[in-house]
Image (cartoon, grey):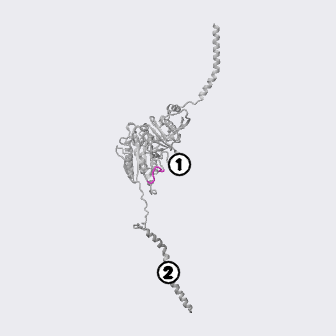
Amino acid sequence: MNGNWRTWVLVLLGIAVVIAAIYLPVLRRRVKVTAKVPQPTEEQARRELTQAVSQSPLDPVVKARMFWMSSEDESALAPVAIDLALSKDPVLRAKQTLNTLLAGPVDSDLRTLPPDAALLAFYLLPDGTAVADFSEALATSTPSGIQSEQLAVNSIARTLEANVPQVKRLKILIHGQELDTLAGHVDLTQMFIVDSKAAQQGALSLDLPVRTTIPAAMAPANSASASQRR
Amino acid sequence: MHISNGLLTRIVFLSSVIALLASAPFFVSNAKSPRQSTAAPAATTQQPFAPITTPPYPTIQVPPQRTALNMVVLDPAHGGTDPGARGAQGIRESDLVLDLAAQVRRALEAQGFQVLQTRSGNENPSFDDRSTLANAQRGAVFVTLHISSTGLPGTVRVYSIPESNAASAVAGILSWNHAQAPFATLSRKFADAVQGQLAQRFKGSPSNSQTASIRQLRTTAAPAIAVELCSVSVQDRTGLDRMMPAAGDAIARGVVAFRPSYVLPGEAGPHP
């Protein structure tokens, strides 16, 4: 009995050694393959957490360019390229892009838009006129000042310009309403030129406002009236 | 019947003279007939009260009167219920810009400029009210004064509205909403002149002015700029108070430097 037991133990150990000999190279290969797969960066991980619900798994992943504050000059913008699944539909694409811009960069000191601001609606007319309707926090939480307000508007306009070529002009609404200024300085009664090519060809500089009439139907009907502020 | 040669000659000569005299009225009437033929229809169509045409008065080319820059409208921004940017320990932009305006005013008056202010107390005129004061003046420039929330403390930036080809303005009509459009180029020169002076005083400030879509400037029909000191984010206002006399002096020097370029739209040529 004792002899049989020892024999069985030795046989089992032998089988285990054979299985291990076969499995170990497979395991090593798997480890190598896993090591080669790029680990998601902190930026990518953040993107996944803050991604808009409108994103579809069918959207192709592209290198999107976001314009946040430059780390070297806080009065300037700098493009940051990130992998982002963007729809081919310009309206969805613009929403995805602006939601990513609102989520902000990893370094929160470089954000250009307040963290509590949200995009409520986005419309695009056939002539390239876009209307972006933001929550009231964009107006109330953006630091008051010419530099900070212009930086906020430019970051929106330049990010749209880089990622949604169909957008030529931009009108910014706050909670469905037209405000006189963003936070006391920058003019929101006008349009911002988004398409820099059009600006160079003729007509208007990048941030020159152009007065146009927005169809009344475009503003959300049940929006609360935002207070006019300087 | 014999007629002598001499008599025949006389008869022929006299006949010719008589024929010429008899036909003279015919030639004369033919010579006058074109005028009469044109005058006659004119007389038939002439109106009973046709205007009397008089020769135009000789025109005298008077050289256009060029407006000289002699006034500065200062606009301490915000005020009243609008404090503007707010910093630590209760620093309010609306209070600081009043002190800054006092310094700028002192420096400008020392240079011989007349100075108007859109507000001198804690009130808050509307954008249009402030523009109205500036637009009612002749030979004036407009300077709106601000303190920022952000930016490198101790620096100063000067802004003008982006230049355009005035596509948004209807030809010949200066819209209130686009009153700044014809002055945009001049405003840019003005902003550069002031920024150049400020950059010499405040290290870290840009050497050239910038453009921004500033609401206050859009309705101002004069060379107009915004000056923004950085910033209310300082621990206390001592540093900002120290900046103000130098900023006032630099702005006044910028206005003086800009004065030769002050040629309003429609007035040709630079001032000597």
Q: Given contact means CB atoms under 8 Å apart, are the residues at marks 2 and 1 in contact?
A: no
What element does badge 2 sit on? helix
Q: Check disc 2 and report the residue beneath it.
A: B24
Residue B250 visible in this rendered orientation of the protein:
no
Residue B182 drawn in magenta: no
Q: Are the residues flagged by discs 2 and 1 from a single subunit?
A: no
**What is the distance, in whole Å, between disc 2 and disc 1 at their CAs?**
78 Å
Q: Nearer the viewer, residue A44 or A55?
A: A55
Tell me the residue at 65%/21% (across/down): A22
Task: Find the residue positioned furthest to the front.
Answer: B1
Find residue A102 and report its horizontal and vertical position in percent: 48, 36
Image quarter of the C terminus of chain B? bottom left
Q: Where residue B88 appears, x then y in whole percent?
A: 39, 36
Name the front one of labels 2 and 1: 2
Q: Nearer the viewer, residue A82 or B38?
A: B38
Q: Percent from the top left, x then y, of residue A204?
A: 49, 48
Type of the residue with mark 1 = Gln
Q: What x and y, as percent, mark residue B119?
A: 36, 46
Q: Quadrant of the N terminus of chain B?
A: bottom right
Chain letter for mark 1, please.
Answer: A
Mark 2 is on which residue type? Ala
The rendered magenta stretch, by its main secondary structure, is classed as: loop
Mark 2 closeness class: few <14, some 14–19, many ≥20 residues within 10 Å: few
Task: Give SS at disc 1.
Answer: helix
Magenta-drawn segment: B165-172
Q: Is residue B166 magenta?
A: yes
Q: Residues within 10 Å of mark 1 (few under 14, many from 20)?
A: few
Q: Is residue A123 above or below residue B142?
A: above
The chain containing the residue under callout 2 comes to: B
In the rendered structure, find residue A201 and report the number of the disc placed on it: 1
Residue B54 is marked as none
